[in-house]
Structure formats: structure tokens, C-alpha cells
Image (cartoon, grey):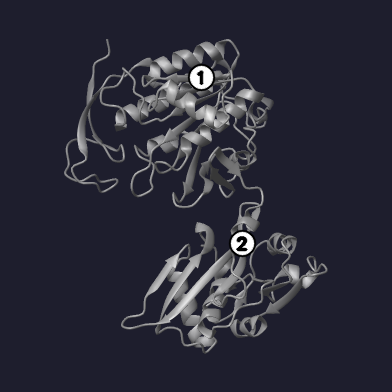
């Protein structure tokens, strides 16, 4: 019988130490070092098939052959995953409570059950009746969507193995990883040891049987995934489901993806019958834009291969005391730089004003290509003159007051033209502007070198 070994483990980050310390050297948390007695078991090791025990050349067919992806049937999710679920992969989906993680995965499970086979949905937080009632409301009930209310990881894996051996299992969904536990490790569900042991068993099952496993993860008040960081290292993809409970908009992003890009974005709307894909998010973000309003400018942001048109709003007010800079969706340091550029190179004295900047729709604009739009929105509010309704602005602004080109301008301009915009302010150094690749009827390009020229073209 294997002897138990005592280890000192940080309950916040999972780091191990040689003894007790008041402060964890890895994450800096105080009084988080705890002593753990762990017994090694065969289930803690990842089991490989016979074909995976011998090294193979990187150029061989066995190494380069790619298994077909399992399409979820929901285009926005397949986009973020890079085309669908990879057989044998493990995907972790995190997000704040009540944002719709369980709703999203229940709809994914129903879609997979209709097209690919049985899907085992393991719920450690709700009963079968509760999950089934929600499935009926979402119109996600299906004979091959199998519900199991279980918190023991070993029993859930036994049920999954029976289906996998019979060749009927298409995917496994665990809701959530913080609620399941295994008898091979001491401690309550949700602690570092239990999460690590259960995740290792689920990864082993996925690799051995070639079945994709999707895990739901809780997040802390800081927005980070709860549990040890080793959990994120074990899985193949980490998806973040974001949104505002006061708004119906939901965003799905990938912070890690071994089989695709981490730059793609999925956009959904929460409705009374579940999540609905937004196929044309640019039009949705601009649907409520006020007409002829000062302090509003449109720019085109790139989320992976998808261009999105977003509205930047700015409001300036006379400061009584130290000037304030309030930003929502914009980097405050970059806004301070743009205000200094306006003051020095455009002779707009805005440094003594309170400046409020917001990206409509709850989106974030942290790429430099949005600099020119933020600058023009601030200038529009300061001058109290609205920008033309059909104008967009693309470009990075430098400290010398120069306007630099935005990457992949052709995609951005094509999206603007599709939605009926008639003019665009871009850098004079933009390759698209020089070659005329996007000079189509109805779109006028104003090429500028400096901030002063951009203001003259806009007003």
C-alpha cells in the first residue's frame, strides 16, 4: 500500500513548499500555506494508449494526422474554438455567476446530441429535475442528452466510460469542476488537491477515449478562474464568458487555445429562451447610436478575423478642482497621452477639463488603431460639433502628433462600407489607401499625416 506523503501547498495558487511560511512566494497570498496528506493512486496519472508510448518523427503521418473536429452546431462557439471541438481535448469555460455558462453549455450539449451522438451532462450543483426543466424551457431537451446529478468524479467517469466503450459518447460536460471530488484525494470539493486530481482524471479519460470534455469553472471576485493555475495548464483551451447582467450582450473569448487562435470573439444575446447568436454584431452595436450627437466617433476594431464597428463616446466638462479622467473600455494611460497630443499639436486646450470616455455596448478598445477615433470624439465634444454620420476613423496616434496606419485596414474598411459608411480617415501611409484596393464607389478615403490634418478632414 502506498504511503501518504505530507506536503505544504498554497490554497490560492497550488504552489508547493518545503514547510510552512506566512506568505506564499509564488502568488504573495498570506496565511494560505496548508499541510496536505496525499496518497498517490493510479488514477492520478495520465494513461496513454499503446500507440502513444513510442516516439515518432514529427514528419510522420502519425504525428501530422489531424482528427476531424466535432462542430458544436453553434457558429459563434465554433469560431472561437477554431472550427469545433477536437476529439480528446479538454475545454475550460469560466465566467461570473449568473452570466449564462450553464445555459450556453446546455445548448451546446443539445446541439451535439442532435448531430453527433450521446452527450453526458454531469451537474454537481443542480438536480436532474432542475436541469431538465431548464432544458425544456430552452428547447434543448433531446433523447441523447443524458443528465446526471453527481458530485463524485469516479462515478461520473464510470458512466462516461460505459458510453464511450459502446461508441455512443460524443462529449462530456462537467458543471462544475469545483463541485466534484474524488475519493483518492483528501479534502473538500473545490480545494487545490481535489481540483487537480479530478482534472487529471478527466484529462486522462479524454485522451484515452478520444472524447472531448468541457468543464465549467467558477471565477473569483477579481475575474480570475478559481482554483490552482495548474488547472489552466492541464486543459487544452480556456474560454471566458463575459457580459453585464444589466445588458443582454454576452461575449465569448479564448485566453488559451492549443488548436486555434485566441483572438476570435463570439457574440451572443441572452433572451427568454436562451442565448441567441448575433451574426451581425457591428449593426447591433450601432443600432442605438444617436444622430448628430457631439462627442461620438465610429472606429473599426479587429477581433481575430472579425471586424467590429464600435462607437467611442466622449464628454468634456469644466473641471472644478483636479481634472478627472474616467474611462470605460479605453486604456486610461492612452487617453492621457491623446489629451496631451491634442493640447500640444492641435491647440485644443483640454487638459483642464474633466474627460469621460466610453465604448458603447460594453466593449473594450485597447488596440492602438482606435487612437484616432478616441481623439476625434474628445475633440468633437470639446468643440461641440458632431462628426459626419457616415465617417469612421482608423489610425494610431504618436507623441509627435503623427497618424500611423492601422493593421489590416482593408478588412476594417470593407466592414464599414458594408454598413453604409461613406468616408474614412486613415493614415497617409496606409497601403490600402495608396494602392486603391478598397476604393469602391461610395467610400471616400481621407488620407492624413498629422492630428491637425485629421481634425481638418473631420470638421
Report x, y in % for residue 1: 27, 9
Q: CA distance from mark 1 to mark 2?
A: 51 Å
Q: Which mark is residue 48?
A: 1
Identify the residue at horizontal 70%, vertical 63% (top origin): 416
Q: Quadrant of the C terminus?
A: bottom right
Q: Given this view, does label 1 or label 2 mark the residue nearer the observer?
A: 2
Q: Residue furthest bottom?
A: 347
Does residue 38 appear to the left or right of 443 in the view shown?
Answer: left
- 329 left or right, relative to 412: left
Quarter assignment of residue 276: top right
Q: Residue at x 57, y 32 (%)?
A: 108
Q: Residue furthest right?
A: 441
Q: Secondary structure at mark 1?
A: loop
Q: Is residue 157 visible?
A: yes
Quarter holding residue 311: bottom right
153 or 28: nearer the viewer: 153
The residue identified by callout 2 is 286
Say few, some or many: other residues with alpha carbon within 10 Å of mark 1 (under 14 / 14 to 19 / 20 or more).
Answer: few
Relative to 270, does residue 297 appear above or below in the rendering?
A: below
Q: Name the secondary structure under disc 2.
A: loop
Amino acid at each position: 500500500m502506498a504511503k501518504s506523503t505530507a506536503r505544504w501547498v498554497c490554497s490560492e495558487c497550488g504552489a508547493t513548499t518545503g514547510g510552512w511560511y506566512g506568505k506564499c512566494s509564488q502568488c504573495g497570498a498570506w496565511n494560505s500555506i496548508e499541510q496536505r496528506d496525499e496518497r498517490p493512486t493510479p488514477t492520478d496519472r495520465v494513461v496513454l494508449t499503446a500507440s502513444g508510448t513510442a516516439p515518432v518523427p514529427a514528419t510522420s503521418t502519425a504525428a501530422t494526422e489531424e482528427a476531424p473536429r466535432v462542430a458544436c452546431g453553434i457558429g459563434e462557439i465554433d469560431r472561437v474554438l477554431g472550427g469545433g471541438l477536437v476529439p480528446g481535448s479538454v475545454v475550460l469555460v469560466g465566467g461570473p455567476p449568473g452570466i449564462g455558462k450553464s445555459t450556453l453549455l446546455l445548448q451546446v450539449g443539445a446541439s451535439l446530441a442532435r448531430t453527433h451522438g450521446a452527450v453526458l451532462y454531469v451537474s454537481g450543483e443542480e438536480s436532474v429535475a432542475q436541469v431538465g426543466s431548464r432544458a425544456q424551457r430552452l428547447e434543448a431537451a433531446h433523447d441523447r442528452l443524458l443528465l446526471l446529478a453527481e458530485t463524485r468524479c469516479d462515478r461520473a467517469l464510470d458512466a462516461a466510460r460505459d458510453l464511450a466503450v459502446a461508441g455512443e459518447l460524443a462529449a462530456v460536460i462537467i458543471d462544475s469542476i469545483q463541485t466534484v471530488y474524488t475519493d483518492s484525494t483528501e479534502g473538500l470539493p473545490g480545494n487545490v488537491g481535489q481540483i487537480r486530481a479530478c482534472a487529471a482524471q478527466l484529462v486522462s479519460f479524454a485522451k484515452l477515449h478520444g472524447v472531448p470534455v468541457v468543464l465549467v469553472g467558477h471565477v473569483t471576485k477579481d475575474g480570475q478562474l478559481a482554483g490552482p493555475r495548474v488547472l489552466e495548464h492541464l486543459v487544452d483551451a480556456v474560454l471566458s464568458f463575459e457580459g453585464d447582467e444589466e445588458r443582454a450582450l454576452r461575449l465569448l473569448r479564448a485566453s488559451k487555445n492549443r488548436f486555434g487562435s485566441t483572438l476570435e470573439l463570439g457574440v451572443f444575446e441572452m433572451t427568454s429562451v436562451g442565448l441567441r447568436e448575433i451574426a451581425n454584431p457591428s449593426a447591433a452595436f450601432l443600432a442605438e447610436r444617436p444622430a448628430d450627437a457631439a462627442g461620438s466617433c465610429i472606429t473599426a476594431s479587429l477581433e481575430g478575423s472579425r471586424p467590429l464597428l464600435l462607437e467611442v463616446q466622449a464628454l468634456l466638462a469644466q473641471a472644478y478642482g483636479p481634472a478627472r479622467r474616467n474611462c470605460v473600455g479605453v486604456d486610461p494611460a492612452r487617453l492621457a497621452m491623446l489629451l496631451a497630443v491634442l493640447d500640444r499639436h492641435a491647440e485644443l486646450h483640454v487638459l483642464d477639463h474633466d474627460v469621460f470616455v466610453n465604448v458603447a455596448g460594453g466593449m473594450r478598445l485597447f488596440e492602438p488603431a482606435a487612437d484616432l477615433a478616441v481623439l476625434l470624439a474628445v475633440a468633437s465634444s470639446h468643440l461641440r460639433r458632431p462628426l459626419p454620420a457616415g465617417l469612421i476613423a482608423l489610425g494610431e496616434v504618436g507623441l509627435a502628433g503623427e497618424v500611423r496606419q492601422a493593421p489590416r485596414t482593408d478588412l476594417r474598411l470593407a466592414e464599414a462600407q458594408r454598413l453604409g459608411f461613406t468616408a474614412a480617415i486613415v493614415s497617409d501611409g496606409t497601403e490600402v489607401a495608396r494602392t486603391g484596393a478598397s476604393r469602391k464607389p461610395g467610400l471616400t478615403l481621407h488620407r492624413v499625416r498629422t492630428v491637425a490634418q485629421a481634425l481638418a478632414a473631420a470638421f
